[in-house]
Amino acid sequence: MPRVSLDHVQIAAPPDCEAAARRFFGELVGLSEIEKPEPLQARGGAWFALEDRGLHVGVEADNFSPARKAHVALRLEPAELDRLARRLEAAGVPVEWDDTLPGERRFYSEDPWGNRIEFLARPAS
């Protein structure tokens, strides 16, 4: 079997999404932006680092529709999960806690364009 691993995930956003992407994923969530390769910069969007992987916000120019079920799940340390929930709520971003996954604390939120985002952490021992 070939060895396959995840390199990055991409979420769709409407045109002119860059400032909102930087505010949400950079300022609120705390991800570092990484520079897109020059040949891809004209497409718009923004890229962010997830340790040794990436989260790409890509522009969907025609008929953008947010993903309501399909989603990105971002794992945090337990204390950071609570801090992030408070930051998002203070910024007016929805936070919906969900206790249905055994062994995990998690909440759902949405990015500025309505894409579902899951944030989770294993409870502190």
Image (cartoon, rainbow, N blue to C red):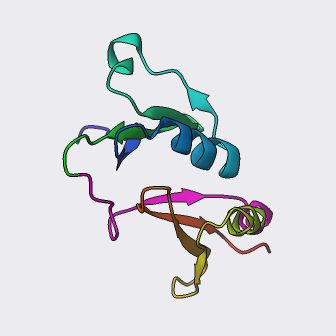
* In the image, residue 36 lies in the stretch drawn in magenta: no
In the depicted structure, whether residue 80 falls above or below residue 27: below
Regarding residue 105, the answer to whether it shows in the image is: yes
> Viewed as shown, does residue 118 lie left or right of 38?
right
- Check the picture and name the quadrant holding the C terminus: bottom right
| Range of residues picked out in magenta | 64-82
**Percent coordinates x, y for residue 79 in the rendering:** 80, 65
Front residue of 63/41: it is 63
Q: Residue furthest top?
A: 38
Q: Is residue 98 left or right of residue 70?
A: right
- Is the residue 89 above or below the residue 57 in the image? below
How many numbered callouts? Answer: 0
Q: Is residue 17 above or below residue 29?
A: above
Q: Nearer the viewer, residue 105 or 32?
A: 32
x, y percentage for residue 24?
A: 59, 49
Residue 104 pos. (x, y %): 60, 76
